[in-house]
Amino acid sequence: MSEKKKESVLAGFKAFLMRGNVVDLAVAVVIGAAFTNIVNSVVKGIISPLVGAVGTKSLDGYTSCLKGPCGIDAKGDAIGVNILWGSVLNAALTFLITAAVVYFLMVLPMAKYLARMEQRRRAREGVQETMEITELVVLKEIRDELVAQRAHSTQNGQHGQTGYGNQGSHGGQGSQGGYSGHPGSGY
């Protein structure tokens, strides 16, 4: 393999490893392995004894014989053709119990936590939007008031006058220092 091709393969592999999904997956595997011990302890230490108190301690011994003679020899191996439905039922119950423990101890609390965080985020955004809307409403009111004042002054024959200094309509003094609003007035 050429040196350039090795570098591109290594660069691609490095980019693959540095992607967020791979790191998240690695963390999930490690946490999952550690959490498996907790789930197994809960199932073996609490739930299985409760099931055993109600019924039988283990379902593994329940079998059906298809072809006899059926039994167990001195080594503990099955003789004949047995259907080990007790083992299958035990595995299914263990799976259901484990899934319930994972759901109620991890998934449900995490979903509630994430929903609360989303609700808080939306509330913060709502407050900010309300502030922005309030500011926008105030600015629109100011604009509308200015437009109304301009329209009112236009109707009274005072187009472009601001009320400061000498106004052009007061005794012909419009060009003597005040703003008259007309071209050539100096302002």
Image: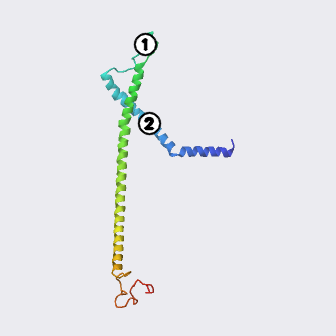
Q: Label 2 belongs to which residue?
A: 32
Residue 52 seen in this snapshot: yes
Residue 125 against residue 2 in the figure, above or below:
below
Residue 108 percent location from the top left of the image: 36, 39
Q: Residue at x 36, y 52 (%)?
A: 122
Q: Residues within 10 Å of mark 2 (few under 14, many from 20)?
A: few
Residue 74 percent location from the top left of the image: 45, 11
- In the picture, residue 2 is in which quadrant? top right
Q: Secondary structure at mark 1?
A: strand
Residue 76 seen in this snapshot: no
Q: Amino acid at mark 2?
A: Gly
Could you tell me if the residues under marks 1 and 2 are in contact, i.e. CB atoms within 8 Å? no
Q: Amino acid at mark 1?
A: Cys
Residue 164 against residue 90 in the figure, above or below:
below
Q: Secondary structure at mark 2?
A: helix
Q: CA distance from mark 1 to mark 2?
A: 39 Å
Q: Which mark is residue 173?
A: none
Residue 48 percent location from the top left of the image: 35, 26
Q: Label 1 belongs to which residue?
A: 65
Q: Earlier in the sequence, mark 1 or mark 2?
A: 2
- In the picture, residue 39 is in which quadrant? top left
